[in-house]
Image (tube, rainbow, N blue to C red):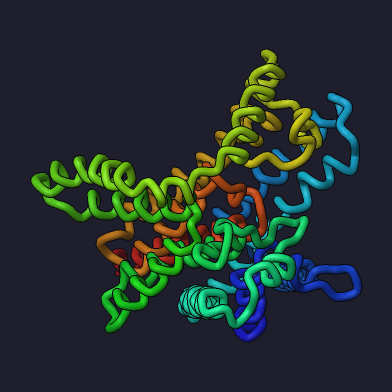
Amino acid sequence: MLFFLTVFLFELFLFGSGRPLVIAGVTVRMLFYSASMFLALLFIVKDSVILKEDFTLILFFIFLLIFSSFVGVVNGADFKNIVGDVLPLLYFLLVIFFGFLIVNDQRFIKCWVSTLKKSSVILASLYFIFLIVIFFGLIDFNSAYQFLSSDSNEIMFRGVDSSSPGIFYKSFIFLVIGFFFFYLSNVKWSRLIALFIFLAILLTLTRGFILCIFVVTYFFLLLEASMLKRVCFSIFPFIIIGCFLFFTDFIFLILRPDSDAARFIQFREVIEMINLNSIFIGHGYGIGTPSRPNNFEITYLEIFHKQGILGLTFWIFILFYMSKKFWYLKDKIPISKPIYAGVLVIYVQTFTNPYLINSMGIGYLALAFVSLNHLTRLVKVEVVE
């Protein structure tokens, strides 16, 4: 079973939204998901056991899916658009599959953490190879651009030529998460590998990733620091901003006027469509805006637009719940720190890219949710004994 899990996770961590791997018109990710849910169903039928925390979360999740779909139907949403909103979210049902595995195999956490760390090193290494090949002219930049660019935005070029060929690849979110698994580890060479990954992240020229590194790192610095250091750290963000002001070329590279304009348009359209009901329950799945009939760039804005405060409360509750688990574990189980750091990465990164409601973000949150729950149970059992 762990072999299946490892292959399953390598595909999740390395192949973006899942579209690069397709068999007979169906993505490999969908095949893995279907197999996992079939196995989860067999486990439940066979053993008649599902963890209380997993069951409660899934119950609320399914209720919210049905309710928001109903609201969309009432508001005249197209059925295809409703399905388009719901399908990616069904990935969250993997909590059931992961929950069963973690109870029945003590190697579960070690397996998925190891797979994620290896994936982040693979991604960083391949990216550096790409940069070297482009920089030395072994492959023409324009040829690489034509080959890698696609309508699905799986890969987007940040640079303009071979002198700055930075790219954004959806799976690079696991570069950021992988960075923290090495950075927050005391294992030999971990900090050096973290530096290697960090340089790769910088060279993507992706604002959200760079911001995410600073925000989450800053959180852990404050968490571990003495009172004096906390005062000093409070000045740190202003120093960073000051440095950026001097490096105008770098600012030019990370500014995205078109992308920023699109976000402002979406925000204005959502505000214009607000009514008393939508504030609390949204307009429902399948209801977009004139400029974004389907997925928004700002995920929290999309959740508010389609599910209102009710939807935002659900996702904030998940963060609060895992934060509570982490606070209990942080001084007891070292691996809880990078696991929780990954949760923060998903939530912070979602301010700029829609990870919270796609398979990559949801997949990681499901892994973190069952892992933090399991580690909490283990610690409590040891305390009782």
**In this orientation, which residue lies closer to the viewer: 96 or 109?**
109
**In this orientation, which residue lies closer to the viewer: 56 or 309?**
309
Quarter occupied by the C terminus = bottom left
Is 19 on the left or on the right of 368, as rendered? right
**In this orientation, which residue lies closer to the viewer: 241 or 159?**
159
Camera sees residue 5: yes
Residue found at x 52% / y 42%:
351
Residue found at x 38% / y 74%:
196
Is 238 on the left or on the right of 201, as rendered? left
Residue 268 higher or lower than 89, as above or below: above
Is 149 on the left or on the right of 324, as rendered? right
Total numbered labels placed on residues in the image: 0
User: In x, y percent, where is residue 118?
Assistant: 49, 80
Residue 131 higher or lower than 212, as above or below: below
Quarter occupied by the N terminus = bottom right
Residue found at x 75% / y 32%:
291
Give residue 18's quadrant in the image: bottom right
Tell which residue pokes out farthest to the top in this image. 276
Give residue 246's quadrant in the image: top left
User: In x, y percent, where is residue 33?
Assistant: 74, 67
**In this orientation, which residue lies closer to the viewer: 118 or 58?**
118
User: In x, y percent, where is residue 352?
Assistant: 54, 44
Tell which residue pokes out farthest to the bottom in this image. 3
